[in-house]
Each structure stands twice: as C-alpha cells, then as structure tokens.
Image: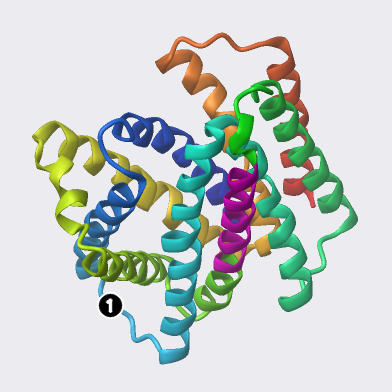
Amino acid sequence: MLGCLTALISAASWAFGSILFRKLGDKATPLAMNFVKGIIGTVYLLVVISFLGFEKTDAQTILLLSASGLLGIALGDTLFFKALIYLGPRLTILLSTLGPVFTITLAIIFLRERPSFLAWIGMFLTTSGILWVLWERAPREEAKNNWKPGVKFAILSAACMSLGIIFAKLGVVTSSAIQATLIRISASFVSLGFWGILTHSLDKWIAPFKSKKMLGLIALAVFVAIFGGFWMFLLALKYIDASIATILSSTTPLFILPMSAFFLKERISARAILGACVAVSGVVLIFLA
C-alpha cells in the first residue's frame, strides 16, 4: 500500500513540476535546466541527510545507483528534451508511454517479477486510459518533417529511463530511498558537468539563473521534483515491483488535467474525463492486487 501511494504521489509531483519547468523552458535550455536541477537537488538532499544521518553504502550499490542516474536522468532526460524540440510536448509524452512497456519487459526478464492476473488487468486499463487522454491532445500536424529524429530521441529516452529504473530497483534494495536519490542526482549532475566543461557550455547554462526570479522558480521546481518525484518513486521501488511502480507513476497526465484547468484555464473534455476514469479504475485494481 505504501509503495502504491508513493508512486501516485510521485506522479502528482511530476505533474506540478512539469508546469513549473515549462515556465523555465522559455529562458533556459534543457541541458541548463537539467544541470542546475542536479546542483540544487544535491544541496537539498545533503541538508536533509545531514540531519537524518548517512548510512554506510557498499560500492556495488553506489555503482548501480550511479548508473541509474547516468542513464535515467542525465541521458534519459536530455534525450526527452531533444524529442520535445522536434515533436512538441504532446507527441513526446504520447511516445514516452513506451517507457512502462520497456520497464515491464526488463523487470520480467532481469528481476524475475511476475505480476498477478489482476495486476496485469489494472496495468492494461491504466495504460489504456492514459493513452486515450494523451491521444486526444496530440495534434497530427505538429511533427511535420521532424518526426523521424523526434521519434528516435523519444524511443531512446524511454529505453534509457527504463534501464535507469531497473538499476535503481537493484540499488535501492540495500540503501535508503533518500540516500539512493542523492547518489542518482549527484551522478547525473556530475556527468552533465563534465560534458559542460568539454563543450565550454557551463557559463551559458548558469547565466539564465543569475536572475532572482529564475533562481527562485527553479528552486521551487527542483524541490517538488526531488522530494515528490524522485524520492517518492524510489520509495515505491523499494516496496513494490518495478513494473507496477512504473505504471502508477505514469499517471502524471491524469494529474495534469485538473492542474491545467486550474492554473492554465484549459477546458477538460468529456473524452479526457472518460480516459481518466478508465485509468483510475486500473489503479484501483493494482491496489487490490
């Protein structure tokens, strides 16, 4: 029950966080946001863990969680942002639903997970409801001539994030969720930092955040992403199967519906409400399973 709840909290946090990061995207590049997110997130986590106390972590766990950060956050998020440039947010999010499919497949092969029949039905209904909601919002003309590289980046992003989840599942078994989050985030921003040094981009990445308004906005966005998104998801991985945690955390579009209506004054269609109801019924079945 705790694992399922934290996965849903993670999804809701990413819904709110995506609205905040979208506001930042007009003035900062994806790599810049990813890098600064890593720095601020690491500071947040170090402060919290200094009060909670550091746990002894073996080298294998650090290696697994670092690999998860490199694949899932540094590389996966960067490829996702690249896909956004070519396809736009709606089609990119639609293709990102391949991620749970990859994760479930990898979890069955490498983690020997065997979801129950009721859980399978729940995962199917949840995924179908999400796709139904997203497909309505995906304009057919948006991709135009850029769809081939965009689709490539979106699929690679989903694959990297899925591999990152598998490594995180293996690593969080022998580590606290918050310390595992610190290792993942630190590995991500350190690798991005090396890339920024090699490409002489660090100054350009940091420049937009010298504004107090931009710094305050990303500080809030990172707080939501780190403690609501990353930490809650790792807690979910600690207590439930990676396949189920991934499906539940993929309900972000359902939380975006009411948030978009409230913050962005968007109209919610009957189709979107129906899709949300189907997805929620799937979540209920997963809880029952």
Taking the spot 70% from the left edge, 50% from the top edge, the residue there is 98
- What's the magenta region? 148-164
Give the image location of residue 169, x and y in percent. Answer: 58, 71
Give the image location of residue 174, x and y in percent. Answer: 49, 81
Q: Foreground residue, 218 or 178?
A: 218
For the question of whether residue 1 can be seen, the reply is no
- Residue 102 magenta: no
Residue type (three-letter) at the residue carrying disc 1: Phe
As helix, strand or loop, the secondary structure at mark 1 comes to loop
Indicate how the structure is coloured in the image.
rainbow
Q: Quadrant of residue 167?
A: bottom right
Q: Foreground residue, 86 or 253?
A: 86
Taking the spot 51% from the left edge, 48% from the top edge, the residue there is 80
All told, the count of numbered labels is 1
Name the residue carrying label 1.
Answer: 54
User: Is 104 drawn above or below residue 146 in the view shown?
Assistant: below
For the question of whether residue 98 can be seen, the reply is yes
Please state if 119 lies on the left or on the right of 269 as rendered. right
Q: Quadrant of residue 170?
A: bottom right
Q: Foreground residue, 108 or 5?
A: 108
User: Is 114 drawn above or below residue 141 in the view shown?
Assistant: below
